[in-house]
Image: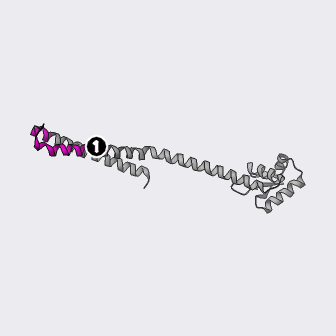
Amino acid sequence: MNNQKIGVILLVLGFVLLGVFLFAFQDLGDKSEELGCFNNDECKPIERSLSILHFGFGLFGFILALGFYMVFLSSGEKALLQKLNKEENKIASGQKFDILLLGLSSFEQEVIKAVRKQSGISQNTLRLRVDMSKAKLSLVLKELEQKKLVRREQKGKTLAVHYILDY
């Protein structure tokens, strides 16, 4: 059961308790007026009951506040936690990519960064972006394909280069 359902149950329970406590409080007030309670020994049970009712009102307030929190405020907390999780994953993926780059040559690093930035880039555009000769780029892409970091597929008269990994 999620927090909102529990919160709604607590709110309903709180309002039911409020009705019971108000009824009991009114009943005890009527009895004390009938007895003319001031410093009378017969009024001690009524005073004890009133003390218990005061505790009950405190309990009612707590249940109502908890229910209100669970219905209206806990969803914001859930969204905040999801956002923090997403940011944590984004940071972790950036760190994984940085570690991956450490194992590559400078040419491979340059090419993989460009392909990661624009997956599906044509080999001609990539050649211009990284400023390499056709032969050098073809050699670097072949090495990256063997390492299973990129994939090339036919796109018209040229090849499209795709980044494979998720980080």
Quadrant of the rendering where the N terminus is positioned? bottom left
Task: Give the residue drawn at x 78%, y 53%.
Answer: 112
Q: Nearer the viewer, residue 82 or 104?
A: 104
Q: How is the image coloured?
A: one colour
Q: How many marks?
A: 1
Question: Principal SS element in the magenta part?
Answer: helix
Which amino acid, by three-letter code, is at mark 1?
Phe
Quadrant of the rendering where the C terminus is positioned? bottom right
From the viewer's perspective, is 71 left or right of 125? Answer: left
Where residue 154 appears, x then y in whole percent? 80, 57
Q: Which residue bears the numbered disc 1?
A: 57
103 drawn magenta:
no
Spot the residue most to the bottom: 146
Task: Give the residue drawn at x 74%, y 48%.
Answer: 117
From the viewer's perspective, is 157 left or right of 76? Answer: right
Residue 39 visible to an observer of this rendering: yes
Q: Nearer the viewer, residue 135 or 48?
A: 48
Label 1 environment density (alpha carbons within 10 Å; few <14, some 14–19, many ≥20)? some
Residue 27 visible to an observer of this rendering: no
Where residue 133 appears, x then y in whole percent? 89, 51
From the viewer's perspective, is 52 left or right of 2? Answer: left
Q: Nearer the viewer, residue 92 or 118?
A: 92
Q: Is disc 1 placed on a helix, strand or loop?
A: helix
Task: Give the residue drawn at x 80%, y 63%.
Answer: 146
From the viewer's perspective, is 79 left or right of 34? Answer: right
Where residue 94 appears, x then y in whole percent? 69, 50
Where residue 53 appears, x then y in whole percent? 24, 44
* Relative to 46, residue 163 above or below: below
* Residue bounds of the magenta highlight: 30-58
Task: Give the residue drawn at x 31%, y 49%.
Answer: 13
